[in-house]
Amino acid sequence: MSVEETGYPPFPAGETLLARTPDRARPDQGGAAEPLLEVTDLRVQFRRGGRRVNAVNGLSYRLPAGRMLAIIGESGSGKSVSVRALMGLLPETATITGSARFDGSELVGLPEPEMRGRRGADIAMVFQDPTRSLNPTMKIGLQITEAVRAHADMDRNAARDRAIELLQLVKLPVPERRLVEYPHQLSGGMRQRVMIAIALAAEPRLLIADEATTALDVTTQAQIMELLLELQERLGMAVLMISHDLGLAATYAEDVIVMYAGRAVEYAPAGTLFEHVRMPYTQALLGAIPRLDREPHAPMPSTPGQAPDLTALPAGCPFAPRCTSADEQCADEPPFAEHEPGHWWACWHPVRDGA
Amino acid sequence: MTTVHERPTETSESPLLRATNIVQEFSVRGAAGLKSGVVHAVSDVSFDIHAGETLGVVGETGSGKSTLARAIMQSPRAKSGEVHFQGTDLTRLRRRKLVAARRQLQMVFQDPFGSLNPKWRVSELVEEPLVGYGTSGSNGRRQRVRELLDLVGLNPDSYGRRRPHELSGGQCQRVAIARAIALQPALIVCDEAVSSLDVLIQAQVLNLFERLRSELGLSYLFISHDLALVKQISDRVAVLHLGQLCEIGPSEGIYRAPRHPYTAALLASIPTLGAGSGRARRPKPISGEPPSALHPPSGCRFRTRCPRAAQKCADEVPQLRESAAGHRVACHFPLDETP
């Protein structure tokens, strides 16, 4: 492949699409504005062989329009389950309670036919593995036009033009040629761009990126994150990013929620969270990330134990058994509250600055 | 723990492992089974690993990291090149001799569940290599299994009788490590051995690798896509791009002042949290897509994405040249030494 084919356009493509996109200027961040998504005391429980798995245990947050929020946590922290609950993508073994209001209307308990109308149109999702999300036997063009025509009454030619626009928007080079290619002919990063194009087909106001860059190389990850950031800004779209990577969240998201054992344990604007970390769990995560400024063979700060069994959660703070500052008070569940302006945490013994 | 296995005496010049001009290619068959192309997975890669040393190998997907590791293990054998391990060329050994030599050369894989037989108990899994190499009687083996489980931080009484599905990912990886060290190897090849673990567990397992290195005098060939992780565990680092070795040298030097534009681009792509300040540095993405290994560009394979590329890069394959003590770079227009 020549340089012209592999190199992405130096300046933003997709002007035509933007010209048609209704103006969705970012609301000022005064805080008074109605949030686009407001999740209150969301709980998800799975039935599994007579036992109950408490996957999400009272999660609350607000996402204003046009903002990027990251939910981070380890495997089993409930980060993915909590967003799938919003999208109605959980199996029937799940019991969802609490509230999730999108633009004022309730999502929890919405019957499937109505959910179908919202999925993709209002809220779209991009998953971790673009290879498994795309149909290997269908050409890219058909997969995109299928999404386009599911949401708008368009003939084939119009849908094809729209597909080309979408591919330009996600900066896929030579979009006309991609339409007639199959997923296996594209690289992982290009496939993820196609997935994003499909997600943008109905111009959603909220894009959920569930570990959308985890399967990609660092070089490609940076490209895709830059693309998401640019789309968020230019389309005025809110982005809910699910990740296990604190570094990635700190770099791109405006707000960050840290989850542990199905609960939010810390929530703050990214800068605040990382400069004034309060929750010992967040601090442990930060310490465990391999860093370029550490010397070779330097021992990693180690947190003993493992994440709690979600079928038998301990009373009180779920992190207490692994926490160095835990004492008898931690047997009572610490409230998740706004202890400092804009900074929420759930801990009796928060980390002090400089500790 | 028994004493560290006696190793053949080595002079300071002879490395534990010397890989020379490793080439691995796979043919791709198209319609009707006809040969339609060749994947150039590893092209002319050479490096040494000294006793007690950890060599990190980094690169993107498809850079040939895993293929290189497997070529060292002789499974499958490289198309050409030599692998001298403890003074013997593994590429010339067959069957029983190769099996005997591999006793000192073990591997830990990425997927902790996939690499353990789900029907076996932990004690059986750890005992298997001991049985395979006919180590002592069953009592001696049972004792050794307990030692090994202790060594990797699993209580033999509570974990010995469990099966893999009753373990977490980190615990499975500890079992895989116990298997790998059971025969007192000199070198362990770790292929993305901590990549699928959560960060807190990853830190635990990394510390375990470091402890075993100092206690048992192990050497590692540590493959990972995570550059920061590789820096923390490695004495030296090799950077692979599309089967070619771009740069190799002491990790401190490579990370402080990368000479190859690809290494610099990789480093610039990682989101990193600053030392004191919380807000992370925004990565500068590299432009373009990695080229195909089926039709790699001529000359330097990074040239299609390289900001410094010139005509010479298309005409000539850059050879590794020493740029500082032990630091070698394969680039016609390397970056300045000062960062």
Image: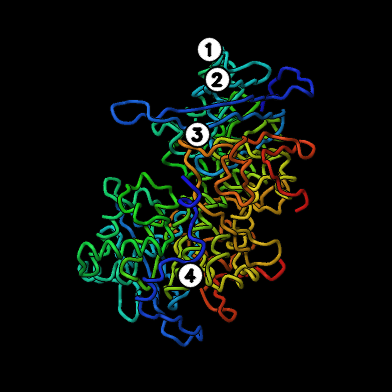
Mark 4 vs mark 3: tell me if same chain.
no
The chain that hosts pointer 1 is B
Q: Which residue is mark 2?
A: B139
Say which residue appears at 48% left-offset and 65% top-offset: A71
Regarding residue B210, the answer to whether it shows in the image is: no
Residue at 67% from the left image edge and 38% from the top image edge: B330
A187 or A86, nearer to the observer: A187
Judge by depth and name the residue closer to the eye, A180 or A268: A180
Three-letter code, disc 1: Arg
Chain under callout 3: B
* Camera-side mark, 2 or 1: 1
Both labels 2 and 1 in a single chain: yes
Chain letter belonging to callout 4: A
Within 10 Å of disc 1 (Cα), the crowding (few <14, some 14-19, many 20+) is few
The residue that disc 1 covers is: B94
Which quadrant, please, contains the N terminus of chain B? top right
Which mark is first along the chain, 3 or 1? 1
What separation in Å lies between label 3 and label 2 (alpha carbons)?
A: 15 Å
